[in-house]
Image (cartoon, rainbow, N blue to C red):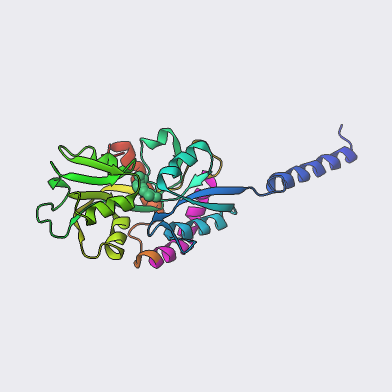
Amino acid sequence: MVGMRSKRSIALLAVLLVMVAGSGCGKKETVKVGIEQNFRPFTYMENGDKKGFEVDLWQAIAQKADMKYELVPMEHGELIKSVKSGAVDLAIAGMTVSNARKNNFEYSSPYFQTGLVVLTSTDNGVIKGKEDLAQKVVATKNGSTAFNYAGEIQGAKIRSYSNVADVYNELKNNTVDAAIFDERNAHDFLQDKAQGQVKMVGETFNKERYAVVGKKRNKYIGKVNQGIESISKDGTYETMYAKWFGAKPDKMPDKIKKEMEYEMQHETVKGR
Ligand code: ARG
């Protein structure tokens, strides 16, 4: 028989346990989140400030998920390494979900869908899309999904750079015939820096879905997913999308996720 007294102390103990668990042992840990210095309009640095759609998005996600965090800006090449080594816990920087990377990384639900595009010099009359790249010199970024895609184009001569700014410079200087990269970033370059010397040709291709990335079996992705879900439901996502892209989103995150899961099971897409 358990006496009144011990029953009460068991109850007290239970309450204490719940309190300790709920408070995360009293202290909230700071999650280190890698962002990119130069991937407009998603994450970039401007006069020492961290800016972009993904910076805003992350702030909202973290708030919903009640996470304390620190944003760590770095170059794209370093980002993947830093996630791998544990120097940062997560990264949000236009990271495309790819089956190939899934062996090493874990992704959140996707929050953005885009694609790749071909860029060429404004006065190039020959290259009208990705079908015209055989025997052409094509610039792209090391280790990106665009690089993987370009590598599969028959006869194309690929030149890859660790910084996308160099890809764009080569285009402007006419030292390459074309470039392949993520559509929104390319669009930003055209508007901002191309000075009319570069154009986008053909259709957007290869679906790219961006998600937060972390090491396999990391403890944060679940919370991040909850955050994404709640900002999608309460209108925050749409407001931010409109702020950065000047329109309503074509697809909300839950729809992007459903389509992605379906496609990843049913087909193999180039560059993944
Ligand atoms: N979305 C492409 C990829 O995952 C390009 C990423 C570029 N991201 C960046 N932060 N520069 O490979």
227 drawn magenta: yes
Q: Between residues 248 and 116, which one lies in front from this camera angle?
A: 116
Res 105 quadrant in image: top left
| Quadrant of the frame with the C terminus | top left
Q: Is residue 16 left or right of residue 59?
A: right
Residue at 33% from the left image edge and 39% from the top image edge: 264
Task: Give the magenta part as a residue range.
Answer: 221-243
What is the x, y in percent for residue 222?
Answer: 53, 45
Residue at 33% from the left image edge and 50% from the top image edge: 164
Q: Between residues 262 and 139, which one lies in front from this camera angle?
A: 139
What is the x, y in percent for residue 188?
Answer: 31, 61
Residue at 27% from the left image edge and 54% from the top image edge: 169
Q: Residue furthest left?
A: 126
Residue at 19% from the left image edge and 49% from the top image edge: 176
| Quadrant of the frame with the N terminus | top right
Res 14 quadrant in image: top right
Residue 94 in sight: no
234 drawn magenta: yes
Q: Is residue 104 above or below residue 204?
A: above
Q: Is residue 73 left or right of residue 1?
A: left
What is the x, y in percent for residue 10?
Answer: 82, 39
